[in-house]
Image: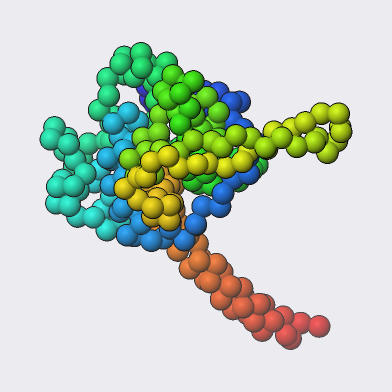
């Protein structure tokens, strides 16, 4: 129990620090239909294991829970497990925590509930993650060689760069400050692709959406069941209300 509480405190501390460093760019809308798309969730699970699990754990999720998104234990063992892991194990990062702290300055946070923890007034957690993972660009002035528009001076490099390719930020556009004509403001001018990735822009956005859908599902695997159950409960209450109303009318009809 103490270990669980400590892990949660560390994760929340990272989230608070990250929130303080983020920019205020508008968030792109995550395609919410992905949450109920089994094929998207399975692809997202594959991306998570191949690109995220090297550094980030999901210590409150077991591999065999992915049976809930249509994968068999044999498929999980064959496609999503490393040699030393078992299907009943929790999803632990393969990186040594000491090396991670040395390389990145901090241990990468656990991602079990990252989508839920990122929810805020500017959008839900899925919107933030969808924007963040698509906002990387090359910046040789940074220690990792990468920066992020949604999270300036981010310590995590772009792990999806082989899929997306490499791009740089265009020189900012100078404009007059609408509130003070004596001042100028810099407006983001977009990205310029300098080398292609293995996916085109549309395919990359689709893949990121699949990954975010999996992160969203992982934070609450029973969400789909809870929603379906809630619909049936509401239908039951609606029918029972009609029955109770007619029963009440029949009971009091002879009372004057």
- Which residue occupies 37% across, 38% down? 161
Residue 200, given in percent of the width and then of the height, sits at: 38, 53
Query: Residue placed farthest to the bottom in the image?
Result: 254
The image shows a total of numbered marks equal to 0
Front one among 125 and 222: 125
Task: State the residue at coordinates (40%, 29%).
Answer: 157
Position of the N terminus, as image quadrant, is top left
Q: Is residue 109 visible?
A: no
163 is higher (above) or lower (below) than 231: above
Residue 189 in view here: yes
x 12%, y 35%: residue: 83
Q: Position of residue 84 (x, y in %)?
A: 13, 32
**Residue 242 located left or right of residue 91:** right
Which residue appears at 31% of the width and 52% of the height? 43
Report the colour scheme.
rainbow
Percent coordinates x, y for residue 189 in the rendering: 61, 41
Q: Position of residue 170 (x, y in %)?
A: 56, 37
Residue sitting nearer the eye, 83 or 137: 137
In the picture, the quarter occupied by the C terminus is bottom right
Horizontal side of residue 70 vs 216, given as left or right: left
Q: Name above or below for residue 12 compared with residue 215.
A: above
């Amino acid at each position: 129990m103490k270990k669980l509480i400590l892990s949660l405190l560390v994760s929340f501390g990272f989230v608070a620090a990250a929130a303080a460093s983020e920019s205020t760019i508008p968030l792109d809308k995550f395609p919410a239909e992905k949450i109920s798309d089994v094929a998207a969730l399975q692809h997202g699970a594959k991306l998570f294991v191949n690109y995220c699990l090297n550094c980030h754990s999901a210590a409150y999720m077991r591999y065999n829970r992915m049976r809930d998104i249509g994968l068999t234990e044999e498929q999980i063992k064959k496609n999503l497990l490393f040699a030393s892991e078992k299907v009943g194990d929790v999803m632990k990062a393969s990186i040594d925590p000491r090396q991670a702290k040395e390389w990145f300055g901090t241990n990468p946070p656990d991602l079990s509930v990252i989508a839920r923890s990122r929810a805020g007034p500017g959008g839900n957690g899925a919107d933030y993650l969808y924007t963040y993972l698509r906002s990387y660009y090359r910046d040789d002035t940074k220690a990792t060689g990468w920066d992020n528009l949604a999270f300036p001076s981010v310590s995590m490099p772009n792990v999806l760069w082989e899929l997306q390719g490499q791009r740089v930020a265009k020189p900012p556009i100078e404009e007059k400050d609408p509130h003070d004509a004596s001042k100028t403001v810099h407006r983001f001018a977009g990205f310029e692709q300098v080398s292609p990735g293995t996916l085109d822009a549309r395919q990359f956005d689709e893949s990121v959406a699949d990954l975010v859908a999996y992160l969203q599902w992982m934070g609450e695997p029973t969400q789909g069941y809870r929603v379906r159950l809630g619909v049936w409960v509401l239908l039951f209450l609606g029918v029972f209300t009609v029955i109770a109303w007619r029963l009440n009318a029949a009971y009091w009809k002879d009372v004057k």
